Amino acid sequence: MKPVVRSPLRDQIRQIILDGLIDGRWGPGDRLVERRLATELGVSQAPVREALRELEALRLIESSPNRGSRVRKLTETDLRQVYEVRAGLEETAVRLRRPPVAALRVHVAGLRAAATADSLIDQVRHGVAFHREIVRASGNDVLMSVWESLGVEVWTHLAIRLFRARAVEHATGHDSLVAAFERDDPHVGVLLREHVLGYSSARHLPPPIDLPPPGTVV
């Protein structure tokens, strides 16, 4: 039997803070006080400090020597730049190797089920999984690592909440990509890039949806 491996405390704290950013507990400009977080979570300050550094690398918070950590005011430019890098990575992935169509169809089915259940969280989860499958299929570990470092799922949630965007991960928007992979379309990389960039600005997103109040379980 393999030993049970617990996720590092840092990762758990980072996820708690991310959840707070997504559900609106902390907004732009709010301070994230290291000592206060450590006390609230019942941990030492070291893993909190590590989690905050990782969130700073994601450009979700900003730190200064005298003012500590604060939630960044995210803009459409921030969103666009993340999606531009993501689009380039995914286009490169399909140039290296095509993903298994059967695996993509599983995620599209998950998107449909999530839409039927009106579950925003599951829509985002399955949509990101669809694109993760494409990048993973490239077989390039460096490419996979860089793509993961973008925090795609987090940015998707933040785009929905901060820019009042509709959930970007719809099954119908992925059907054409699956069909292109199935027929081995030589232009599928371009199609994928445009698909990702189509959500990189609130101007290109569908009309807003009514979001549940912060803290509501979706």
Image (cartoon, helix red, strand yellow):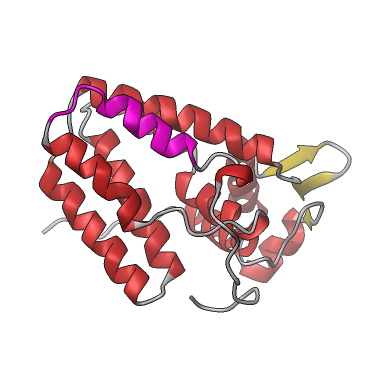
Q: Visible in this render: residue 79?
A: yes
Q: As rendered, which of 111 and 9 lies closer to the eye?
A: 111
Q: Tell me residue 149's x, y (percent).
A: 46, 36
Q: As rendered, which of 218 and 149 lies closer to the eye?
A: 218
Q: Image quadrant of residue 22?
A: bottom right
Q: Tell me residue 1's x, y (percent).
A: 10, 59
Name the side, left or right, on which 3 lies relative to 57. left
Count of numbered labels shown in the rendering: 0
Q: As rendered, which of 189 and 216 lies closer to the eye?
A: 189
Q: Visible in this render: residue 144?
A: no
Name the side, left or right, on which 10 lies relative to 131. right
Q: Tell me residue 204's x, y (percent).
A: 56, 43
Q: Which residue in the rendered view is the most extreme toward the right?
A: 66
Tell me the chief SS of the magenta region: helix
Q: Residue at x 37, y 57 (%)?
A: 170
- Note whether 39 is above or below 140 in the view shown: below
**Residue 105 is a magenta residue:** no
The magenta stretch is: 184-198
- Note whether 14 is above or below 53 in the view shown: below
Q: Image quadrant of residue 59?
A: top right
- Note whether 103 is above or below 123 in the view shown: above
Q: Residue at x 12, y 38 (%)?
A: 182
Q: Residue at x 15, y 49 (%)?
A: 103
Q: Tell me residue 17's x, y (percent).
A: 61, 59
Name the side, left or right, on which 216 lies relative to 126. right
Q: Residue at x 24, y 55 (%)?
A: 107
